[in-house]
């Protein structure tokens, strides 16, 4: 079975109602990320950091996967599909994708500040000061903050190296090491880029640009790939 590796960013969840980071109304527009998504922010003002993620977690519980997430889940009936996402939402999983690698963590999970191997799925939207792990240490959002190591990057690189098709959806490709994954795509592997505002043009070798919103462009591409295969 051919292997399709998909790298997704905030743009794939935009039509589910989740703000992106760098679009005009993006999340960072109202906040400096230095104030929120860094270990020093957590040290200086843990309540502010908890509030930032609580607001996003509450919003996530009201959102649902869109046609792009669902089309990628459908692709698993025809190909081996590995999703590598920068997103911390669980919309890929809720759509039915079974192989999802989160590079930047998972919003619905929390982990111990003293025993990072202790990770918990939160059953509500709110994580508070005083919510502790089973060994009594404060819980923190299970998010990879700027300056922190990206634990699954090596596994992601190995997956990209084995791709027969590589699809990039809804990412500005400005944050490393995630953006660097494109450098590991095998030489003759077709690359598809789905983004309404991408800077890349079609003549970039081996890249087919689909300048559409994900909920339109992804189902179209998935249908083409399935028809090509059948
Ligand atoms: N469909 C497809 N793409 C879209 C849509 C849409 N409906 N709306 C916006 N986009 C595109 C934008 O054109 C942009 O290229 O999605 C991309 C979003 O880029 P960012 O907001 O930078 O999000 P992302 O690339 O995921 O950010 C990477 O930065 O702040 C960190 O950890 C955070 O994981 C995040 C990382």
Image: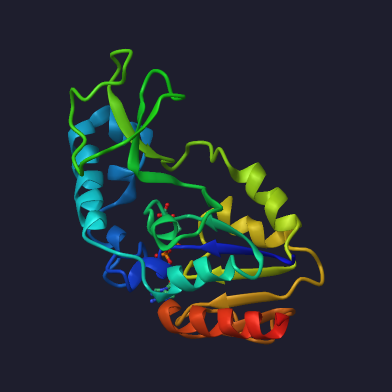
Q: In the image, residue 119 lies at what x, y percent?
A: 40, 30
* Quadrant of the image occupied by residue 22: bottom left
Q: Is residue 33 above or below residue 70?
A: above
* Quadrant of the image occupied by residue 168: bottom right
Q: Quadrant of the N terminus?
A: bottom right
Q: Residue furthest right?
A: 187
What residue is at 33 percent from the left and 49 percent from the top? 33
Q: Which of these two is toward me, 33 or 163? A: 163
Q: Quadrant of the C terminus?
A: bottom right
* Quadrant of the image occupied by residue 179: bottom right
What residue is at 22 percent from the left and 46 percent from the top? 52
Residue 90 placement, left or right of 71: left
Q: Which of these two is toward me, 156 or 48? A: 156
What residue is at 18 percent from the left and 34 percent from the top? 47
Q: In the image, residue 38 lies at what x, y percent?
A: 36, 39
Q: Which of these two is toward me, 158 or 24? A: 158
Q: Residue furthest top?
A: 135
Asked if one can make out residue 45 in the rendered structure from this viewpoint, the answer is no
Residue 123 placement, left or right of 143: left
All told, the count of numbered labels is: 0
What residue is at 73 percent from the left and 75 percent from the top? 190
Residue 184 placement, left or right of 7: right
């Amino acid at each position: 079975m051919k292997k399709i590796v998909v790298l997704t960013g905030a743009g794939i969840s935009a039509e589910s109602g989740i703000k992106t980071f760098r679009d005009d109304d993006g999340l960072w527009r109202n906040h400096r990320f230095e104030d929120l998504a860094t270990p020093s922010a957590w040290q200086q003002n843990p309540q502010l950091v908890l509030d930032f993620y609580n607001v996003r977690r509450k919003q996530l519980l009201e959102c649902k996967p869109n046609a792009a997430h669902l089309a990628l889940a459908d692709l698993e009936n025809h190909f081996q599909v590995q999703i590598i996402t920068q997103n911390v939402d669980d919309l890929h999983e809720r759509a039915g994708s079974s192989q999802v690698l989160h590079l930047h963590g998972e919003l619905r999970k929390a982990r111990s500040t003293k025993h990072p191997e202790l990770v918990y799925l939160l059953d509500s939207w709110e994580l508070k000061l005083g919510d502790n792990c089973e060994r009594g240490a404060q819980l923190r959002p299970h998010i990879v903050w700027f300056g922190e190591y990206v634990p699954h990057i090596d596994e992601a690189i190995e997956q990209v190296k084995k791709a027969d098709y590589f699809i990039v959806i809804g990412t500005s490709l400005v944050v490393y090491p995630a953006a660097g994954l494109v450098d590991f795509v095998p030489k003759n592997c077709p690359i598809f880029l789905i983004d309404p505002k991408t800077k890349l043009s079609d003549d970039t070798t081996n890249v087919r640009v689909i300048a559409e919103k994900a909920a339109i462009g992804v189902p179209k591409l998935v249908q083409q790939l399935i028809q090509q295969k059948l």
